[in-house]
Image (cartoon, rainbow, N blue to C red):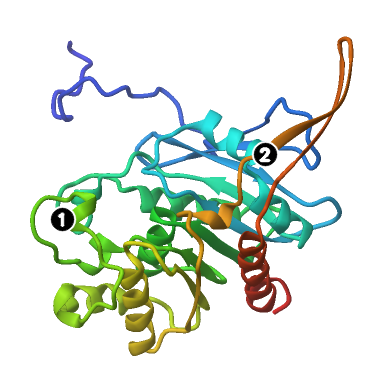
Amino acid sequence: MANRDLSRPGGWSYRTEGTIVGPLDYVTQVSVALEPPIMLHLVFMGDGVYIPAVVRVPPGPGPFPAVICVHGGSGGLGISFLVDQVLHRGYAFERFLEAGYAICYTEGRMEYDELYGTDTPVQLDHLDVINVFRYLQRQPDIDGERVAFFGVSHGGEMQIKIASEIGDGPGPAALVPAEPAVRAYLGLKFTGSRTEENLVFNADLDDSQIDLELALKRISPINPDIPILILGRDTDHFQGLFKKVYELLQRTGKKASWKSYDHNIHAFHWGPRRTEKIEEYHGAIVNYTSGYAVDDLQRKALDDVIAFLNEHVRDR
């Protein structure tokens, strides 16, 4: 007790006897036979959490432009989910790789939807993705000034939040928010509880249907030089919301453009899951083909996305 410093804060936090050596990130290859290989990066956050990022890099010499892809779930789904999606719902990833982009498929921790914009001291998922973005920029095989984003639904909303809060340093080279669910970001007004039936906003929204002052305050910090392609879906219940964020970006002088598609599936841009078709069967030997049964609109949407990224990221 005589040698103990009683003036230090109380508690049971561990105190090392030596210096912690960084970086604290961790990289390993996923044990799946695939070329280019799947590399798992565990990106260390300041609060001790590791955020997974699955990375594939095209063959040949780098550094490469990159696309960070974020899904539309609420985060916290884990490594096995990300790897499964890359392996079995990888149409978009394969297209990006063929076009010469490294791909990074990542997510933040579980989303706390109602805490966005409050003073509650909690780390939100889009802040995790900002840290992954900064991490990817530092990798030697990535061109840190040519890192773009692509994501659907909540993954589209996160891109807008990221652009608003990226802070100092080079920002994203381009954003492609598809069907961005910016309900909380724009302060969408609705009556009753938050149920699907109370969240039908397919028609155009006027300014009175959102918290306009708050929305403009959030949009203001977005760098006007970042090209942003907002992708809508004609029949989506939030189509009016997608159009509204595009309109506000335009109104405030941001570099935004708009495309919309008449497809019946939310997040159709990812493409379908991989299908396997048995061609021959001889006893224990099965020959089968494996691929993606992509429809014309899914192919067209990815064509548009890649053309946009090529113009503003790869070939700039």
Nearest the eye: 235 or 179? 235
Q: How far is the residue under mark 1 from the one under mark 2?
A: 41 Å
Q: Quadrant of residue 201?
A: bottom left
Q: From this viewpoint, which residue is outermost toward the right?
A: 282
Write down the residue under mark 1: 118
Q: What residue appears at the point 47 percent right and 57 percent down from the top-left corner?
A: 152
* Residue type (three-letter) at the residue carrying disc 1: Thr
Q: Is 53 positioned to the left or the right of 234 in the image?
A: right
Q: Quick one: 308 or 3, which is closer to the camera? A: 308
Question: x%, y% of residue 106?
Answer: 52, 45
Q: Is residue 105 above or below residue 283?
A: below
> For residue 262, which numbered disc appears in the image?
none
Number of other residues with Cα within 10 Å of mark 1, as a class: few under 14, some 14 to 19, many 20 or more: few
Query: Is residue 253 rendered to the left or right of residue 138?
Result: left
Callout 2, which amino acid? Answer: Arg
Query: Which residue is the site of mark 2?
Result: 274
- Left or right for 21, reference 102: left
Circle 2 packing at 10 Å, graded few (<14), some (14-19), many (20+), is some
Q: Earlier in the sequence, mark 1 or mark 2?
A: 1
The quarter of the rendered structure image containing the N terminus is top left
Find numbered disc 2 in the image and state the secondary structure of the residue it sits on.
loop
Q: Is residue 231 visible?
A: yes
Front residue (pair 142, 73):
73
Q: Horizontally, is 110 left or right of 133 in the view?
A: left
Q: Residue 29: percent from the left, percent from the top?
A: 70, 31
**265 in relation to 256, above or below:** above
Question: Looking at the image, which residue is at 48% across and 54% down?
Answer: 265
Q: Position of residue 177 (x, y in %)?
A: 47, 65
Q: Is residue 33 above or below residue 143?
A: above
Residue at image point 14% right, 29% down: 7
